[in-house]
């Protein structure tokens, strides 16, 4: 048997047990450009620069799982020209002043951030078709009060029906209320939104997109209410920010998809009670650790003095108790 001739291909070099560690020094991106997020759609984010240029961007891997939402102030690198086919990278998200967060329902633990850095929460309800729901309005108000967002109630379709009486109760707790019709000029509402970042929330079919089209230069798709179910059809698939027309700088109005459930499982129950300003003083007279759903609760005497129920107060206490009983642990 002849002796085999070896060459370099026969040599196997084993890898070292220790590899050189990757550097922990990350780029500082000192030349990053600030931008405002106006929409997020399937991994692509549309941002507006200070000069008004719209730029398409994607989130950098170094940001990890942190999400980017409409209203965020971000830092961009890469191609920020805004030309067709250009793509920038989001390398930083500025600290959020406020956030509007919800869970899918009261049993869910996963929190979803809808928008960020908003000044005003515009709760849009219809006088009829679909009928306004007190419980959903109260949930919006709780989230707004806790986050420090100013709530505004806008009642649409007032030319078709009279607004339910319970909607007037929110004026007593400092909620600005506006009524609109098909032909109303919206002057007072426009003045309230001017200079602010506001978000429209509510059921599908209440007129959020129609309201946005009238207050801005946008042409968002609108739809009708289903005659059988009484529910609106989803015409907005994602949140979208549009500048307010005839307004000062940094006046934005954000349209959102219709919301049928607004879970509050991420909020401490004690903070929910504090959000009801008109009931907070009453609950101070309750016993220690009162669940506010007991026989000796001070709210019972307040809503039915001398055993005579006052419908408005009963409805208000019921809204609070429904939120507390919804499993908000």
Image (spheres, grey):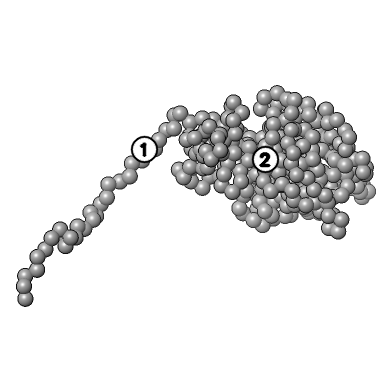
Horizontal side of 225 relative to 198 (left or right) equals right
Left or right: where does residue 49 sit relative to residue 250? left
| Res 164 quadrant in image | top right
Q: CA distance from mark 2 to mark 1?
A: 36 Å
Q: Residue furthest front?
A: 84
Report if the CB atoms under discs 2 and 1 are less than 8 Å apart: no
Query: Which mark's residue is nearer the viewer, 2 or 1?
Result: 2
Residue sitting at x 60%, y 34%: 54
Does residue 293 sit above or below 89 in this rendering? below
Total labels: the figure holds 2
Residue designated by label 2: 240
Q: Residue furthest left?
A: 2
In this rendering, the answer to whether 2 lies above or below 55 is below
Residue at figure coordinates x 74%, y 39% from the top left: 219
Closest to the observer: 152 or 61? Answer: 61
Q: Using the image as rendered, state which of residue 206 and residue 2 is in the foreground.
A: 2
Disc number placed over residue 241 in the picture, else none? none
Tell me the SS state at disc 2. Answer: strand
- The residue carrying pointer 2 sits among few (fewer than 14), some (14 to 19) or many (20 or more) residues within 10 Å by Cα, namely many
Q: Residue at x 63, y 40 (%)?
A: 39
Q: Secondary structure at mark 1?
A: loop
Mark 2 vs mark 1: which is more N-terminal? 1
Name the mark on residue 25: 1
Which residue lies most toward the bottom here? 1
Q: Where is residue 109 shown, x and y percent of the image?
A: 61, 54
> Camera-side residue: 10 or 289?
10
């Amino acid at each position: 048997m002849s002796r085999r001739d070896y060459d370099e291909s026969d040599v196997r070099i084993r890898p070292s047990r220790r590899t050189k560690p990757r550097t922990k020094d990350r780029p500082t991106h000192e030349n990053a450009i600030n931008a405002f997020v106006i929409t997020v759609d399937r991994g692509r984010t549309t941002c507006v620069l200070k000069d008004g240029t719209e730029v398409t961007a994607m989130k950098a891997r170094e940001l990890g799982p942190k999400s980017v939402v409409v209203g965020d102030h971000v830092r961009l690198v890469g191609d920020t020209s805004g030309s067709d086919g250009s793509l920038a990278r989001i390398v930083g998200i500025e600290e959020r002043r406020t956030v509007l967060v919800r869970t899918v329902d009261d049993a869910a633990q996963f929190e979803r951030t809808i928008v960020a850095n908003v000044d005003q929460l515009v709760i849009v309800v219809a006088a009829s078709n679909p009928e306004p729901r007190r419980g959903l309005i109260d949930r919006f108000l709780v989230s707004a009060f806790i986050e420090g967002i100013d709530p505004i109630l806008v009642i649409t379709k007032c030319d078709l029906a009279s607004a339910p009486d319970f909607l007037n109760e929110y004026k007593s707790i400092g909620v600005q209320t506006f009524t609109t019709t098909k032909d109303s000029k919206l002057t007072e509402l426009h003045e309230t939104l001017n200079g602010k970042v506001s978000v429209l929330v509510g059921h599908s079919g209440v007129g959020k997109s129609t309201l946005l089209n009238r207050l801005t230069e946008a042409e968002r798709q609108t739809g009708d209410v289903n005659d059988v179910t009484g529910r609106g059809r989803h015409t907005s698939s994602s949140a979208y920010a549009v500048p307010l027309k005839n307004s000062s700088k940094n006046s934005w109005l954000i349209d959102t998809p219709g919301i049928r459930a607004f879970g509050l499982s991420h909020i401490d129950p004690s903070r929910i009670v504090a959000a009801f300003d008109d009931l907070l003083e009453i609950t101070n007279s309750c016993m220690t650790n009162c669940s506010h759903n007991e026989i000796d609760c001070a709210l019972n005497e307040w809503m039915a003095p001398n055993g005579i129920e006052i419908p408005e107060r009963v409805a208000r206490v019921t809204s609070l108790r429904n939120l507390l009983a919804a499993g908000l642990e």
